[in-house]
Image: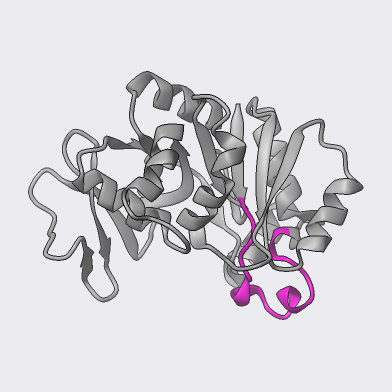
């Protein structure tokens, strides 16, 4: 199975560490984030991994060169410019689209007990273009799904902003926290430039656009999902206590 780790971000919230190191190598209980995600993917049966790099990319290259995880690992180089989550997927697409196998996308700063193998299997069985892992955890930004579990909108609870423009949740719809983990089919990757999506863009914006166009983007809702976003000092400190 294939996976793409989003690891190119600047990690501004984790300064001063990220002034001299990539966010992906921030230690959690003495183990770099990237290593924890790689080992979790391997445990779940993933063997073909692509990692995007930008900020202190050479440190990630050196780390991977000096650690053998028993995986096929390739890099998608974004040193020229950060491309955001959607642009990163488009840039890396040639590494994924050798066949029709879907790709699991995983933020490098997410630690969870998510059943990643089951998520991939559920995606294949559903025939969806993308499957987004969601939960009931506390989050100010929510994805909105209809009663059939299909993506239809986005809501920022802090300022009551909605997307797409003019959208509002209706009766029967649910608002769920996105986990930073999702599965995308190669056809969805190939559709990006065909629908005008190039350069730097958010994958959530792309998903909302494609949902409007009739593509099937579904949730996999796990209300009791245990997840820590360790891209922030407070949650990193909590993770250190758990794994230290």
Q: Which residues are magenta?
A: 6-24
Note whether residue 196 is visible.
yes
Q: Is residue 109 magenta?
A: no
In terms of depth relative to the viewer, which is nearer, 116 or 77? 77
- Kindly identify the residue that appears in the image at 33 percent across and 49 percent down: 207
Q: Position of residue 132 (x, y in %)?
A: 39, 41
Q: Is residue 16 magenta?
A: yes
The number of callouts visible is: 0
Note whether residue 114 is visible.
no
In terms of depth relative to the viewer, which is nearer, 31 or 1? 1
10 vs 93: above or below: below
Residue at the outermost left position: 171
176 vs 165: above or below: above
Q: Is residue 145 left or right of residue 167?
A: right
Looking at the rendering, which quadrant does residue 125 occupy? top left
Q: Position of residue 69 (x, y in %)?
A: 82, 36
176 vs 132: above or below: below
Q: Quadrant of the C terminus?
A: bottom right
Residue at the outermost top position: 125
Q: Position of residue 156 (x, y in %)?
A: 28, 67
Q: Position of residue 63 (x, y in %)?
A: 85, 53
- Kindly identify the residue that appears in the image at 68 percent across and 65 percent down: 79
- Kindly identify the residue that appears in the image at 34 percent across and 23 percent down: 127
Q: Is residue 206 left or right of residue 2?
A: left
Q: Quadrant of the N terminus?
A: top right
What kind of colouring is applied to the model shown? one colour
- Kindly identify the residue that appears in the image at 55 percent across and 26 percent down: 117
106 vs 234: above or below: above
Q: Is residue 150 left or right of residue 240?
A: left
Residue at the outermost right position: 66
In terms of depth relative to the viewer, which is nearer, 237 or 41? 41
């Amino acid at each position: 199975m294939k996976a793409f780790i989003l690891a190119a971000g600047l990690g501004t919230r984790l300064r001063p560490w990220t002034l001299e190191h990539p966010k992906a190598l921030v230690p959690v209980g003495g183990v770099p984030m990237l290593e924890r995600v790689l080992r979790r993917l391997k445990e779940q049966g993933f063997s073909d991994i692509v990692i995007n790099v930008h900020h202190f990319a050479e440190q990630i290259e050196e780390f991977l060169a000096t650690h053998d995880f028993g995986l096929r690992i390739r890099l998608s180089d974004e040193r020229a410019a950060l491309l955001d989550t959607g642009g990163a997927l488009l840039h890396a697409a040639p590494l994924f689209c050798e066949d029709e196998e879907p790709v699991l996308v995983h933020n490098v700063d997410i630690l969870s007990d998510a059943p990643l193998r089951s998520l991939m299997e559920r995606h294949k069985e559903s025939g969806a273009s993308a499957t987004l892992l969601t939960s009931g955890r506390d989050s100010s930004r929510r994805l909105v799904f209809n009663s059939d579990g299909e993506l239809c909108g986005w809501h920022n609870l802090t300022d009551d902003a909605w997307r797409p423009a003019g959208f509002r949740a209706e009766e029967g719809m649910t608002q769920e926290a996105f986990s930073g983990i999702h599965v995308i089919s190669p056809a969805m990757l190939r559709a990006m430039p065909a629908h005008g999506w190039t350069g730097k863009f958010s994958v959530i914006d792309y998903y909302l656009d494609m949902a409007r166009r009739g593509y099937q983007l579904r949730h996999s809702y796990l209300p009791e999902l245990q997840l820590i976003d360790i891209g922030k000092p407070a949650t990193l400190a909590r993770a250190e206590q758990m794994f230290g």
